[in-house]
Image (spheres, helix red, strand yellow):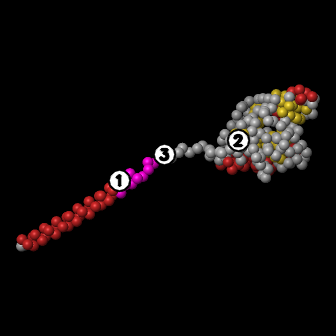
Amino acid sequence: MSGEARGNVVAAIAAVVALIVAVSVSMLVDTGSDGAAAQSTSPTAEPAPEEEPFPAITAVPVGHHGEYAVQYDDVPPETQAQLDTVRAIIERYPTGADAMAAGYIPATVNLKGIASHYIKSGAIGFTTFDEAFDINEPEALLYDGNEPDSPIVGISYLASGVTAPEGFEGPWDVWHRHDAVCFAGGLVVAEVGGHEGSLIDITAQECAAQNGITYPIDNLSMIHVWMKPGYPSETGVFAHDHSDLV
């Protein structure tokens, strides 16, 4: 091979090598540049917030015992499923006659705010409760009256000896207690030493004036649940008083 030809080959090889080096350097520069830009412009990733055990509730505690003014749509699915059970129970006993056919007996007069309580064993049932909570077996059915056709408005659970029974999922089922009740004519006619704002609170002297007997029930915890379709309480499903029972 002549010197001139050899020189041409060498020059061609050198040109190819230079091209390869140039392309490689360009790729490295682009990748590095893009990577650096991505790192320098991307915000620092923040850790994902811990999932709340229950959704935030905008309602604040209200009412006589710090109840939450929550409705069905405010609570998580687990609590909604329990409230569905309550709704089914309410639909099962639409009138006082249905309650009595199932063994529930009026234990109170139609009390302002909380209705008439139908309890198995009647008024003496207040002394027979245990501390168990069974969502399928409410201790009381609540009716707007004591007549056979009186409509149901809610249900109530009662438990003896426990301050805060393990009831519904979440913090919104605030259970309450009363110091005593007034029995007159075989029925509970009022609270004695009741909570602030009670519509049915009287003194022991006022109870005696009605030929009534003051009976302590401060060992009982109870909660009302207002889940009748088409009859919501503005103060919430777990409120002590139903907003329309005044």
Residue 131 belongs to the span the image colors magenta: no
Residue 102 image position (x, y, % from top left): 84, 44
Q: Which residue is mark 3?
A: 47
Residue 101 image position (x, y, % from top left): 87, 45
Camera-side residue: 17 or 227?
A: 17
* Type of amino acid under label 2: Tyr
The numbered mark, 2 or 3, whose residue comes first in the sequence reads 3
Per the rendered image, the range of residues in magenta is 34-45
Camera-side residue: 189 or 200?
A: 200
Residue 44 belongs to the span the image colors magenta: yes
Q: Badge 2 local density, few (<14 within 10 Å), some, or many (20+)? A: many
Q: Quadrant of residue 143?
A: top right
78 w.r.t. 14: above or below:
above
Q: CA distance from mark 3 to mark 1?
A: 23 Å
Q: Which residue is mark 2?
A: 68
Which is in the foreground here, disc 3 or disc 1?
1
Q: Is residue 173 visible?
A: no
* Type of amino acid under label 3: Pro
Residue displayed at 78% across by 33% down:
196
